[in-house]
Image: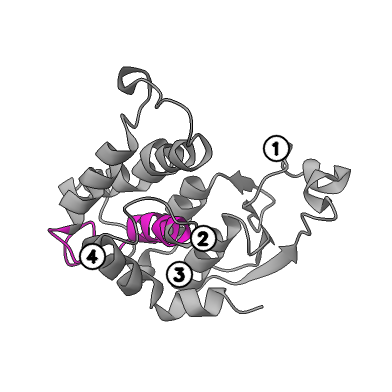
Amino acid sequence: MAGQMRLYYNPKSRAATARWMLEEVGARYDLVHLDFEAGENRKPDFLAVNPMGKLPTLVLEDGTVLTETPAIVAWLADAFPDAGLAPPVGSPARGRYYRWLMFNGSCLEPAAIEKLMRKDAAPLPKVSVGWGSYDDVVDTLEGALGQGPYLLGERFSAADLMIGSTLAWLAMFGAPRISESTLIQEYVERITDREARRRAQED
């Protein structure tokens, strides 16, 4: 795919995941660093690109703006098929891939944020939230990883990039059960040892 994309970026944001994906697929892109402390993500020039003032924001070569990490990751996987990060459309594996790609934002992140930020509050009712409970989420991940080494079996995919990057972040912030789980820690080490991720951490 020809052309140069532009990623609005701060290494302490979910844009780190988008940059990792750009490196995985071998895309050509420019980084636009935004300083959160200086409020650059709330200035009019950036809000004109993404009114939410959030990262990641990826501008494609034709000016199309993509936001939301799963959307960016999924688009890049399809736009660069030679990278082999998504199963064929219509295959059973594609269905499982979608499941885990979306599991991150619908279950893993919100369950973890509830656990970390509402420590003294009663858990939200399981029947009212899409993730059920934090323990349900961790149990489900451990069950899948027990069949590993990746979420789709032997094949690393963009879904692993999404889930793996979030698990690494949760371990860093001391989320319960993440660092204590051998299955999860071995998975995180496997995922984060990729050359593309190391490149994505360079400034």
Reply above or below: 47 against 59. above
The percent position of residue 147, horizontal first and vertical second, equals 12, 58
**Mark 3 Cα shell of 10 Å, populated few (<14), some (14-19), many (≥20):** many
What residue sits right under mark 2 in the picture? 17
Work out whether mark 3 precedes mark 2 in sequence or the reverse, and give the earlier one. Answer: 2
Kindly tell me whether residue 57 is visible in this rendering. Answer: yes
Q: How many marks?
A: 4
Label disc, if present, on residue 52 of the rendered structure:
1
Task: Name the element at disc 2.
Answer: helix
What residue sits right under mark 3 in the picture? 25
Task: Calculate the distance from the C-alpha at mark 2 to the C-alpha at mark 4.
Answer: 23 Å
Task: Calculate the distance from the C-alpha at mark 3 to the C-alpha at mark 2.
Answer: 13 Å
Label disc, if present, on residue 182 of the rendered structure:
4
The residue at 81%/44% (across/down) is 42
**Mark 4 Cα shell of 10 Å, populated few (<14), some (14-19), many (≥20):** few
Label disc, if present, on residue 198 of the rendered structure:
none
Q: Of 98 and 187, which appears nearest the observer?
A: 187
Q: What segment carries the magenta color? A: 146-170
